[in-house]
Amino acid sequence: CVTLDVQAACRDPTVTQELLKEGFHRDLLVKVELGEDAGGCAVAAQMRLPPGIYVDPYELATLQQHNLTKAVLFPDAIDVEAPEYLARDLLLLLFLEPEARCSRCFRAAVPVHARYHRPAEGTQEAWVVLESPEVLLCCCHSHLSAECWEPAEVDAPCSSDNTSPCQWHSTKHKPAHEGSMLRVPVGLREHNSLVCALTLLTTGLCTGLILAAACKYGHF
Amino acid sequence: TYRYTPLLAWLLTPNVLLAEAFGKLLFVAGDLAAAVVAYRALRRRGAAARHACGCCAAAWLLNPLPMAVSSRGNAEALVALLVLATLYWVEAGSVGKAAVCYGLAVHMKIYPLTYVLPIALRLRSGPGRGEGALDAPGDKTAKFTFMARLWHLFVKMLNRDVLLFGTVAGSVLAALTVTFYHLYGWEFLEHAYLYHLTRRDIRHNFSPYFYMLYLTAESKWSFALGLAAFLPQLLLLLVVSIAFYRDLAFSCFLHTAIFVTFNKVCTSQYFVWYLCLLPLVM
């Protein structure tokens, strides 16, 4: 009976992740409801973005300048033009803001962009799977219950001043939440020969027409 | 991603120091200045004031595409201004000023490099002279084969004007390249010039080759297809230069229209490159 009480005292945070808007350019909205009060700790969500999706570092820098979003990217040098098969995974640490509707709710949004995927056989779509984010707390002065939270190793600094001993914490139990999926349209590999033939034929024809007009009206 | 000359970055530093909209306002001003140069070029040719004004307004000033391109922050208006200035000075006979504008224009965007053939042919024949550079001396024109005339054309290309133009433009370009290489190293060369020459972009889809290049991006035919796409462009540019160089503005307009249409990559700002010459050919 005692063990049940201890486990019941540790409510895991509820994490929801939504992709807003349509198309290749979306907004990733992360909402977290903590099991207990944050107690003055900064709340963040860490997620691994697959190669099929990326965050534009320049866009992020502009948003941070205007105090609209706060996030850290690893690595911070991203090739924004690379197709999915030439790109790498990305680690995004997104700092969440308290939400007005409830005392333990936090949320943040960050713009994300899908990459071009390679053409596929038999299907006109590819899927980008986003795993559920991990909730991290950065605490400087407060103490969190040791049953629910454990120290975590995170590369980003917790707070701007280095005087207080700030430490990142993650949940002891890592429940599997549902991730989200992004549908990306792709070309059909079966169309290869037809597209090549048509393109070269059309451009050849246009070249011929222009040459004919140049010979007719030009002054040689 | 920024792949232009450092000169443009320097021009835009007031964006950081003064106001974020400075760059866009600068390009809009460039847009208007380009219209002024086009108007003066038309008037110089003898067009009536009202007709010239109408052409400039209809084709450039009131055209929504240049407006959108300049106000979204693309620097095409500045290159358009330099290209129009080059053509204006060539027609006016000031070869030196034309060469400086041309060197600057090529440094900012590589595409004006294709104008070198029409400009050289035009300078060879000189402003106002009726006969073209292809005419052989005397009355032996009928006996000359096409290849012989072509050879005659290229050998006799070099006259004082062409040499002056080439030297001044080449020096301006070389000076700018060396200065920026000294300041920024290999990264400058790679991004400002080399990237544009070997660019394979499967994302911008105005080019007729876009879907073909996207589907074959990883196949072994990719290089051969890229070459197959380049050859018609080259052939057409050569033929058009030789056929229409007498009317320099028209020749450059055709050059750019063909270059943009048959290019492997085409984004909406490329259309501004030939739209700026439209008032002159109307």
Image (cartoon, rainbow, N blue to C red):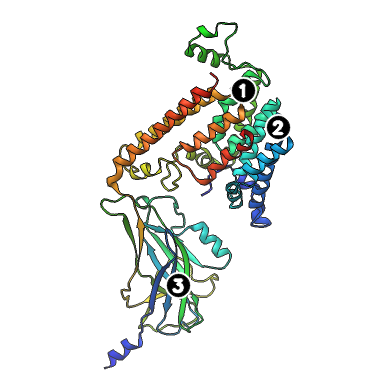
The residue wearing badge 2 is B47
Between label 2 and label 1, give the one nearer the viewer: 2
Q: CA distance from mark 2 to mark 1?
A: 21 Å
Q: Residue at x 57, y 47 (%)?
A: B65
Please name the amino acid that badge 3 sits on: Ala
Q: Are marks 2 and 3 on the same chain?
A: no
Can residue B175 be seen here? The reply is no
Q: CA distance from mark 1 to mark 3?
A: 66 Å
Looking at the picture, how far across and down is residue A128, in whole percent? Answer: 34, 60
**Rendered position, A71 above or below B242:** below
Q: Residues within 10 Å of mark 2 (few under 14, many from 20)?
A: some
The residue wearing badge 3 is A44
Q: Residue at x 45, y 80 (%)?
A: A105
Name the secondary structure under disc 3.
strand
The chain under label 2 reads B
Name the mark on residue B158: none
Name the secondary structure under disc 1.
helix
**Rendered position, A109 above or below B8:** below
Please name the amino acid that badge 1 sits on: Arg
Mark 2 and mark 3 residues within 8 Å of each other at the beta carbon: no
Can residue B273 be seen here? The reply is yes
Please name the amino acid that badge 2 sits on: Ala
Name the mark on residue B122: 1
The chain under label 1 reads B
Q: CA distance from mark 2 to mark 3?
A: 67 Å
For this rendering, which residue is in front, A18 or B15?
A18
Q: Is residue B153 left or right of residue A91?
A: right
The chain under label 3 reads A
Q: Are marks 2 and 1 on the same chain?
A: yes
